[in-house]
């Protein structure tokens, strides 16, 4: 996901539903990006925060405990998701309202209805979208 998005040191990666924090940690460690995970499960939040602390990534990576529908995503330059088709459908308007043009959205497995991917990795089930102005990407 991070390779496909072209992540780098100038990026701010938001992983929605960050689980154990692996995308957040890799974005910080391997791609030198700032990274934020949003996770609703408090156990996974604690696990992710511990991992970030043990790897001394506190200044570069963090996990927010909460519902990503209530988190401002406007600073993101990359958003990663592994949600469901229904959740992606509900998320579309939030992404279109909050993300700046040029922000990259990478989704594992599930697509965004009506959006045309900029790139697809069929083997790894990834779709990359680039936000265009105030209109639907594509």
Image: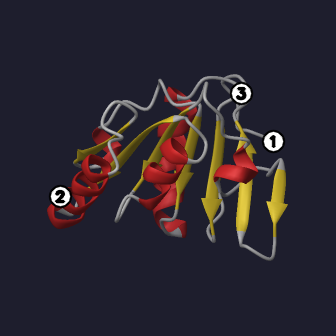
Which numbered circle lies on residue 138?
Answer: 1
Residue at image location 55% in from the left, 43% down from the top: 79
Question: Which residue is at 72% across, 51% downward?
Answer: 3
Of the two numbered discs 1 and 3 in the rendering, the one whose residue sits closer to the viewer: 3
Q: Judge from the rendering whether residue 123 lies leftward or rightward of residue 81; answer left or right.
A: right
How far apart are the two marked residues, 1 and 2, measured between alpha carbons? Answer: 37 Å
Question: Which quadrant would the C terminus be assigned to in this image?
Answer: top right
Residue 104, horizontal then vertical, whole percent: 67, 39
Please, what secondary structure does the residue beneath circle 3 have?
A: loop
Comparing 54 with 69, the one in front is 54
The secondary structure type at the circle numbered 2 is helix
- How packed mark 3 is, by other alpha carbons closer than 10 Å (few <14, some 14-19, many 20 or more), is some
Which one is earlier in the sequence, the residue at label 1 or at label 3? 3
Q: Nearer the viewer, residue 37 or 56?
A: 56
- Residue at screen point 15% across, 60% down: 42
Q: Which mark is residue 102?
A: 3
């Amino acid at each position: 996901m991070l390779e496909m998005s072209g992540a780098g040191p100038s990026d701010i990666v938001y992983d929605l539903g960050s689980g154990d924090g692996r995308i957040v940690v890799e974005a910080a460690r391997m791609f030198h990006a700032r990274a934020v995970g949003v996770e609703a499960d408090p156990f996974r939040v604690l696990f992710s925060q511990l991992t970030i602390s043990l790897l001394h990534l506190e200044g570069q990576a963090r996990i927010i405990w909460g519902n990503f529908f209530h988190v401002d995503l406007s600073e993101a330059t990359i958003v990663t998701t592994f949600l469901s088709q229904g959740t992606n459908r509900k998320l579309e308007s939030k992404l279109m309202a909050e993300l700046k043009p040029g922000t990259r959205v990478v989704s594992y497995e599930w697509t965004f209805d009506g959006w045309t991917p900029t790139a697809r990795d069929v083997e790894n089930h990834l779709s990359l979208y680039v936000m265009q102005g105030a209109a639907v990407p594509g």
